[in-house]
Amino acid sequence: MTETAKAKREMEFLLAKPERWALQGMAKRTPLWLNSNHFTALGVIGATACGTAYSLSSRSADWLWLASVALVLNWFGDSLDGTLARVRKAERPRYGYYIDHIVDAYATFAIGVGLGLSPFVRIEIALLLVLAYLTMSINVYLESAVFGVFKISYGKVGPTEARLLLIVANGWRNEVVLGANIVVGAAALGMAVLLVVRFAQNLRRLAREEPRKRYRDRAQWANKEPPPGDGG
């Protein structure tokens, strides 16, 4: 787990460079009495407020404005907590790795369920989107353990781009329900396809790095003592 928490971060999504520049600038100007935990809490508040605003949009579409503001708060808190620790040379790799991913899972669930409780997206489709996103996240965590690389994006799309897409969608307050369901359903399907492609690529890489052992005869296999815990 220690090595997983220290996995090399690869940020290749579309807005990675300008986002990194902006976050480092903000971290350097953050008052000393604020620490990473404060921003983690802000990210949780933002996700909760976003999900709540989505659910309340059944009463008035004006709640979508609050959902957009809450998404910005969620990005600010979720992105700045780790950057602040790195800028101040105050990293806690295992603590940060653990709390960050638990919080990310909660944020995904809160926003997704809120979206499903809105009048724009059916709850079943919203939950499929949540499932696809969480499965992609789990794959990233497994890659960290297997390859020693933490690659958060799929292609050029990362969490920042996903939030921006939601904010843009929130501005389409006259969007018909059918269209919104099609867009969200297509997004869930696209995420599933990206996951399958990356899964296949990872399996091919692992197969090359750890080829299957072959034995010439049954006697050689019978005399071979398998290592403890080897399930392969």
Image: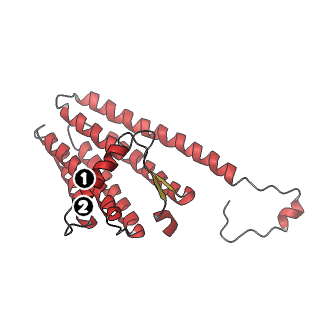
Determine the secondary structure under disc 1: helix
Query: Relative to residue 54, is residue 36 depicted above or below?
Result: below
Q: Is residue 160 visible?
A: yes
Q: Residues within 10 Å of mark 1 (few under 14, many from 20)?
A: some
Whole-percent x, y for residue 208 in the image:
69, 49
Q: Which mark is residue 31?
A: none
Name above or below for residue 214 compared with residue 122. Answer: below
Using the numbered discs, state the Cα–Cα distance from disc 2 to disc 1 in whole angstroms: 7 Å
Q: Position of residue 55 (x, y in %)?
A: 18, 46
Indicate the quadrant containing the C terminus: top left, top right, bottom left or bottom right: bottom right
Secondary structure of the residue carrying tag 2 is helix
Q: Amino acid at mark 1?
A: Phe
Horizontal and vertical percent position of residue 231: 66, 63
At horizontal 27% and vertical 28% (from top left) the residue drawn is 178
Is residue 13 depicted above or below 44 in this figure? above
Is the C-beta separation of discs 2 and 1 under 8 Å?
Answer: yes
Question: What amino acid type is highlighted by mark number 2?
Answer: Phe
Residue 105 point in image, percent of width and height = 35, 56
The image quadrant of residue 24 is: bottom left
In the figure, residue 162 lies in which quadrant? top left
Residue at (32% x, 31% y) in the render: 183
Determine the residue positioned at 56% across, 56% down: 147
Question: Which residue is tagged 2?
Answer: 39
User: Mark 2 or mark 1, which has the lower sequence index?
Assistant: 2
Please state if 58 lies on the left or on the right of 22 as rendered.
Answer: left
Q: Image check: 206 left or right of 221?
A: left
Residue 122 appears in the figure: no
**Residue found at x 33% / y 64%:** 85
Task: Check the image and report above or below for 46 versus 96.
Answer: above
> Mark 1 highlights which residue?
76
Comparing 39 with 219, the one in front is 39
